[in-house]
Amino acid sequence: MDKAAKRNKTEDPASQPAEAQASGGQLTEEQALEGQTLEGQAPEGQAGEEDHNHSHEGHDHTHAEGPPPMDPACKREISVEIPADVVAKQQEALVQQYSKQARIPGFRKGKVPASMVRNRFSSEITSDVVEHLVPQYFREAVIKGGFRPVSQPHIYGLEFTPGEPIKFKAAFEVLPEFELGDYKAIKVEKPEIAITDEQIDAEIKQVQERQASFDPVNDDRGAENGEFVQVSFEARPKGLAEGEPEALDAETAKTKDTETKDTEAKDAKDTKAEGAAATETKGSEQKEAAQPVHMEEVLVEIGGANTIPEFSQNLSGAKAGEERSFEVSYPADFYDKRLAGLTFDYKVKVNAIKKKTLPELNDDFAKELSPDFQTLDDLRQRFRENMEAELKHKAEHEAKDKLVEELIAKHDFPVPRSMVEHQIDLRLERGLRALAAQGMKTEDMRRMDFGRLRAGQEEFAKKEVKSSVLLAKIAIKENIQVSNEELESEIEAMAAQMQQPVEQVKKRLAEDNAVERLRDRMRSEKALNLLYSNSN
């Protein structure tokens, strides 16, 4: 069996894969930014004071540029006063510390007079006093006031006069108070999952096709319909003069084409695009499209459903060793943007004619696939189980999405702007990673209209924040807990998925103060599962 030839069957400009056409080609920015989930939030403020303390230690709480946008219904403001004796005590402690560490010509280390330290390091000491005391007294004030901030505080109106108390004001966001509606009344359908024999036959047929062998036709005749010609070719955009950009080599062309198609096939399933937004990268795509292409040992099926008609027409009847020249005009909506809307001149050499032979579907076929299968019925049963599990997961996911939509529709409440902005950041970050995985260049990303992209994620982010807040509130009401054992199991699963040691994942979670956020997320998932199980 010619495995190399089989591998190249559709990875070339002569074919138009059905899956690539169905997905509409490369993901747009908006598509890549869809299907995200909420992370990194502790919406009920239940992550503990430890999380909050850490987030403010060492942070510059003064924001000269003004406070960030806050929802008026979620905004809270407090006035804080730090007693003068506390300020003086902290100043003196810092003076003593500076005296021990300061290096000043004429004085030994640790022997610098306090008066000189106060004069020489006045601004640094003042800054350190503010940095140390403001977070501490802010925390005490919010605890005393019964607030649970979900955003970094904006510190303003800071007054610091020697010998007097430090005064400042702080603005921050909290979750609004609202009552849960009758969430137990929400009902969603759970469709019956049934896999037909025809569906299993279709899946096995695909495996059979992938196991096909391509055997040389030794007769002295031309290629016939349904057979494959193994060819090498050069293709140049029409009008491109000789000596202009060198043709892409076979590996580069195949790798780029393969990576794009694989990403499309994988990511298109999880995206829900509401429009195309690829205009920022159109210029660079067209520039790349104008490059010549050179490929070796490509299989082209004569008359194949996915074969470009011009290839079938011009290579039908060709014999091994023959060369053919012809033009191919690609439609403007062709899946490969490097070729779309362009006409290429092809010089094709036929290296061999091959006939595809499918393996017989029997017990030996099943055994060859895996030692887990002894008979063809074993294979069919595995396919049935896998397909049922996949469809069940998909149906459950869709049902839960509808459940969350109805849950949100039943509750009208504002959400902190900081949480929405954070969620938009996460969605953009994941979207950019998806685009980078497709091969988008950094300079092309920099040209993207991020203002437009952020605005496009606004409603999605709001819904995700609302669903997170609601599920967290339900988890509290239903007294849903996540045990240490469950948390440990989840971290182990994460480590296995990332193929990293468990201790390494634990360490990173601890460093990011993300362990309790993970627990909160698991509680919310439990709450959603509870709603789903009670929904019909």
Image: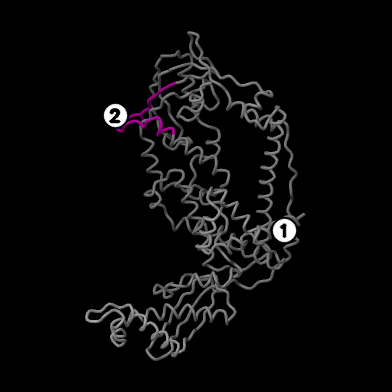
Q: Residue furthest right?
A: 536
| Residue at image mark 2 | 241
- Mark 2, Cα crowd under 10 Å, few <14 / some 14-19 / many 20+, is few
| Amino acid type of the residue that numbered disc 2 sits on in the rendered structure | Ala
Residue 328 % position (x, y):
43, 26
Q: How is the image coloured?
A: one colour
Q: Secondary structure at mark 1?
A: helix
Q: Residue furthest left?
A: 106
Q: Magenta includes 307?
A: no
Which of the 4 quarters of the picture holds residue 92?
bottom left
The circle drawn on residue 530 is: 1
Between 167 and 241, the residue placed more toward the observer is 167
Q: Secondary structure at mark 2?
A: loop
Q: Magenta includes 236?
A: yes
Residue 30 % position (x, y):
50, 50
- Magenta residues, start to end: 231-254
What is the number of callouts on the image?
2
